[in-house]
Image (cartoon, helix red, strand yellow):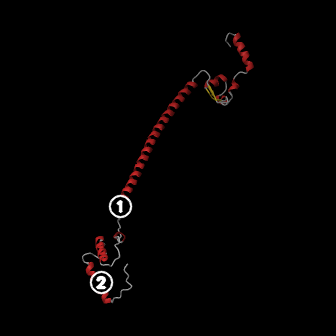
Amino acid sequence: MLSLNNIHKTREQLQEEAKELTALIQPETVPIGNINPGRFERMAYHLERFGFADHKRDIDDFIYDPVPKIQQATFQAAMGIALLVLLAVILIAAWFGKTNHRLKQEIALRQQTQRSLEASRQHFKRIVENLQEVYYRTDLQGRIVYASPSASEIIKLPLQQIIGRDIASFYAPTYHREDFLNALHANHGQT
């Protein structure tokens, strides 16, 4: 590195040097502040050749580049990553699209099944409500959860009093059953 501490020049000598440098710089041809890397490389070559510089320095570290050039390997790696990300996004979007389509089909099928079940339920209800015979359903404990309107007519109780009761309360006790069967037998199946 060049040290300026040992240089002792007069003002006139420094001004003469500035004139010579101005002639070498040629500010009329190349405005001051304009950076041309090729020009700096030539200057570095001459300074090294005449012994003013110890070794050649990389010009890229000296000149600021506001739009640095990307090395091809870096660019290719970045493009590869971008393509992989894009491919992943496309695959995920396709998966979501396929899943969405399947879900729409499943929803449509369930809605159709619900409509069909409701139609069957309404049809069954109309049949049961018009039956002359008694129809009822119980839960696992034997409590009546549904009874046809004919049950109310035969038992002579409103449906509200029938539903919720134990089904066994509507059967004849066992000791009356024998009497009932004997009466049927004696009357040849007539009551």
Q: Residue at x 67, y 23 (%)?
A: 155
Q: Which residue is mark 1?
A: 71
Residue under pointer 2: 18
Judged left or right of residue 191, residue 118 is left
Quarter of the picture holding the N terminus: bottom left
> How far from the left and from the top, in percent, is residue 48?
31, 76
Q: Quadrant of residue 175?
A: top right
Q: Tag on residue 109?
A: none
**Percent x, y of residue 49:** 30, 76
- Single out the residue that lies furthest toward the right: 175
Crowdedness of circle 1 by 10 Å Cα count: few (<14), some, many (20+)? few
Mark 1 secondary-structure assignment: loop
One can see residue 34 in this view = no
Q: Residue at x 45, y 37 (%)?
A: 105
Would you place residue 51 above or below residue 123 in this image? below
Kindly indicate the quadrant of the structure image that contains residue 40. Answer: bottom left
User: Which secondary structure lies at badge 2?
Assistant: helix
Whether residues under marks 2 and 1 lie with C-beta atoms below 8 angstroms apart, the answer is: no
Considering the image in quadrants, where does the C terminus appear? top right
Q: Earlier in the sequence, mark 2 or mark 1?
A: 2
Q: CA distance from mark 2 to mark 1?
A: 40 Å
